[in-house]
Image: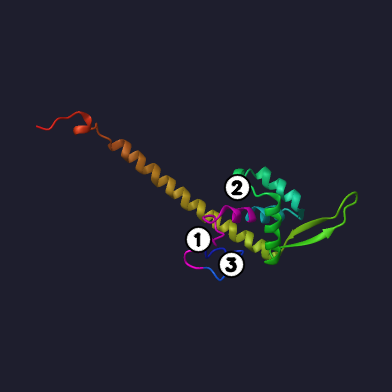
Amino acid sequence: MSDIIEPLEAEPGGATAASAADNCVCPTGKVERFVQACVLLFLARGPSHGYDLFHELVAFDLGQELPDLATLYKNLRRMEARGLVTSQWQAGAAGPGRRGYRLTPKGQQYLERWVQALAHGRSLIDRFLAEKGRLASLHDAQRLPATGPEAGEREG
């Protein structure tokens, strides 16, 4: 599934087979990649500032996977370098200027690929859980009273 969405950053010296899973941005990859997908989703609603995006991530309830503000800005810079978002300084009326972020057409395409990958992943998980439930039901239906030495049965 890692071929559905290309990595945002290559491993130094190029990706190896051992690092391919670490370089995956699909739902089975690292959670920080999912944070980037969330940022793209939030920017699909309209332009935003980094601090506001951070609060949207908090509201999305990522729990322990929530990046700190510095990590979010680092990811936004990477996403901008890849052409997924653009940014522009905006003068503040009563305070310092802020950098506003906007989704690019490439970022929209990347978001759509995430949607496809997540839908595929959800389908796999649903099938997996359904099969596990079916096996558990079969196991429960076929369960017989325990026999043998563990059940107190003595051999002759």
Residue at far right of view: 94
- Looking at the image, is 114 positioned above or below residue 146? below
**Residue hosting label 2:** 65
Q: Quadrant of residue 61?
A: top right
Horizontal and vertical percent position of residue 56:
70, 47
| Alpha-carbon span between mark 3 and mark 1 | 12 Å
**Residue hosting label 1:** 21
Check residue 55 in the rendering and tell me which mark sits there, or answer none. none
- The amino acid type of the residue labelled 3 equals Ala
- Range of the magenta residues? 16-36
Between residues 11 and 132, which one lies in front from this camera angle? 11
Q: Earlier in the sequence, mark 3 or mark 2?
A: 3
Q: Residues within 10 Å of mark 3 (few under 14, many from 20)?
A: few
> Could you tell me which residue is drawn at 60 percent across and 47 percent down?
65
**Residue hosting label 3:** 10
Residue at far bottom of view: 13
- The amino acid type of the residue labelled 1 equals Ala
Q: Are marks 2 and 1 in contact (CB under 8 Å)?
A: no
Q: Are marks 3 and 2 in contact (CB under 8 Å)?
A: no
Secondary structure type for disc 2: helix
- The amino acid type of the residue labelled 2 equals Glu
Secondary structure type for disc 3: loop
Secondary structure type for disc 1: loop
| Alpha-carbon span between mark 3 and mark 2 | 22 Å
Q: Is residue 14 magenta?
A: no
Horizontal and vertical percent position of residue 80:
71, 63
Type of secondary structure dominating the magenta stretch: loop
Residue 147 shows in this picture: no
- Looking at the image, is 152 positioned above or below residue 18? above
Horizontal and vertical percent position of residue 103:
72, 60
Q: Quadrant of residue 112?
A: bottom right
